[in-house]
Image (cartoon, rainbow, N blue to C red):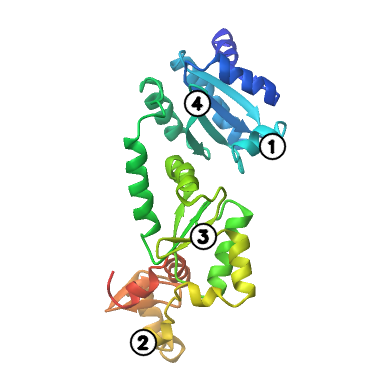
Amino acid sequence: MAAGAAEAAAAVVEVGSAQQFEELLRLRARSLLVVHFWAPWAPQCAQMNDVMAELAKEQPQVSFVKLEAEAVPEVSEKYEISSVPTFLFFKNSQKIDRLDGAHAPELTKKVQRHASSGSFPPSGNEHPKEDLSLRLKKLTHAAPCMLFMKGTPQEPRCGFSKQMVEILNKHNIQFSSFDIFSDEEVRQGLKTYSNWPTYPQLYVSGELIGGLDIIKELEASDELDTICPKAPKLEESVEYETFDILEDEEVRQGLKTYSNWPTYPQLYVKGELVGGLDIVKELRDNGELLPVLKGEN
């Protein structure tokens, strides 16, 4: 048992400098290289190190590497590592995929898929690029106002994305979002498509408006409200009635059983319970509240 553990540990290489990392990329160019950007203070990183050690046993043809993100900042900055754990996948010294977060099943799937997929396709193949351009065009036109960000409006994963969401919400701007961490192809491709190297990126009617600095400038000059579509105000769009449960104790207690919902307030649309305050806030943040209130969902 101890010998097996030692063998697994030896199968995962630890890198301590940018020079060592670049050398490893060259030496392991012909195989799949999986790099775990980790931090000793994050317990989820320790868990994923154990997962990687097990994968190293199962996939001896794959090279597994640990790199402490904060100890080698030049590499972390080059590959835009903003959180740990993050996994990068390399073939032919080129980055081909990325996984953010402690998702053991997804890591296993990606390792298996890339290990069996052969060499990374040569850059001369233009068809995937054409397909990606078409996909990016559809994504940027997916809503009148589209925000490409790190994370989601509810859980931004970088300070710039968080500030962007706060500005849009403050101005009551209706927008949809795309988490670039969920798709590495989109994340890298959009930089070329838009000729804009950083995130977040805001699009209106499929046209790039800019990043956080541009949006701050537009806000300061009072132009933001004229460029971005406003979310309709609920009081102007939805008719509703209220009932004061403090006026009728029988209704107050009976509705809890009737709806199987123990607290107030409770919101109903067409006689169906939508939920309480937390549910309504989630629907609002996801842009789904107005359709629900109108009975469209």
Disc 3 target residue: 154
Mark 4 or mark 3: whose residue is earlier in sequence? 4
Return the x and y of residue 270 as percentages of the image width and height: 27, 79
- In the image shown, does 122 or 173 lie closer to the viewer? 122
Name the side, left or right, on which 137 lies relative to 195.
Answer: left
The CA span between labels 4 and 2 is 56 Å
Mark 3 or mark 2: whose residue is earlier in sequence? 3
What amino acid is found at the position of numbered circle 1 in the picture? Answer: Trp
Location of residue 147 with respect to 229 vertically, above or below: above
Mark 4 or mark 2: whose residue is earlier in sequence? 4
Location of residue 52 with respect to 149 vertically, above or below: above
What amino acid is found at the position of numbered circle 4 in the picture? Answer: Phe
Which one is closest to the eye, mark 3 or mark 2?
A: 3
In the image, what residue occupies the spot 39% across and 67% down?
144
In the image, what residue occupies the spot 63% across and 55% down?
159
Which one is closest to the eye, mark 4 or mark 3?
A: 4
Mark 1 or mark 2: whose residue is earlier in sequence? 1
The CA span between labels 4 and 3 is 31 Å
View extreme (bottom): residue: 247
Return the x and y of residue 216 as percentages of the image width and height: 62, 67
Disc 4 target residue: 90
Name the side, left or right, on which 248 lies relative to 218.
Answer: left
Of the numbered discs in the image, which one, if any, rests on residue 41?
Answer: 1
What amino acid is found at the position of numbered circle 3 in the picture? Answer: Gln
Q: Are marks 3 and 1 in contact (CB under 8 Å)?
A: no
Return the x and y of residue 127 as percentages of the image width and height: 31, 36
- Whether residue 40 is visible, yes or no, is no
Mark 3 or mark 1: whose residue is earlier in sequence? 1
- In the image shown, does 127 or 148 lie closer to the viewer? 127
Identify the secondary structure beneath mark 4: strand
